[in-house]
Amino acid sequence: MYDRTEAPFHDRQEPQLAYQSVRKQYHFRPSGSGLHAWDVDRLVALADTLPEQAVPLQDVVEIETNYWFNHGYEPTVRAVVEHVRLVNEADLSYAIILDPDDRIMDGMHRVAKALLLGHSTIAAKRLQALPDPDYTDVQPDDLPYDV
């Protein structure tokens, strides 16, 4: 069973949800007022009517960062395997979501899959304004993860 204590920072989830195709997700960012968290379901709804555009994968800044294993989370074999599973299951028919500064808010596993498959671009929807976070000064373990 998936050990949630080793879950990467951006993909925190309850163990019983780890193998379901749809799982509760949050996008996290540090800020001056503590950790901000956005409910990915809300981000998807906000981006729903936005046009898709092809974004060159080379322009995705996060592919050169410690995106999943930062903030004290270690890239254990179990955590890497969990990400490999999520990359394999990623559906490239869904556009990633970018903030107004072209930072990823949803879709890093799809980016990884596109890279793995040798794609040069990925479908993206760009938010026109950064929405207020759903949670401020929160710890990932304190968020609701039930569907």
Image: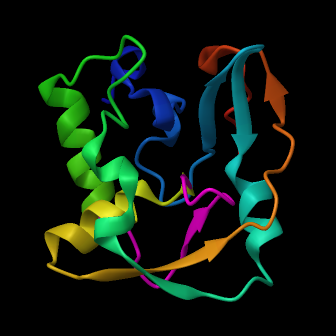
Residue 94 percent coordinates (x, y): 52, 78
Front in this rendered view, residue 86 or 21: 86
Residue 75 percent coordinates (x, y): 21, 25
Decide whether residue 19 is among the magenta residues. no
Residue 143 percent coordinates (x, y): 72, 24
The boundaries of the magenta stretch are 89-104
Is 88 left or right of 116, judged from the image as shown? right
Quarter of the image that includes the N terminus: top left
Q: Residue 98's image quarter?
A: bottom right
Residue shown at the point (71%, 32%) measured from the top left? 37
Q: Residue 114's image quarter?
A: bottom left
Is 66 left or right of 27, judged from the image as shown? left
Q: How many marks?
A: 0
Is 145 left or right of 103, judged from the image as shown? right
Residue shown at the point (60%, 33%) measured from the top left? 28
Please determine whether, in this image, residue 106 is positioned above or below residue 133: below
- Secondary structure mostly seen in the magenta stretch: loop
Please determine whether, in this image, residue 58 is positioned above or below residue 15: below
Is 138 left or right of 60, judged from the image as shown? right
Decide whether residue 99 is among the magenta residues. yes
Front in this rendered view, residue 53 or 114: 53
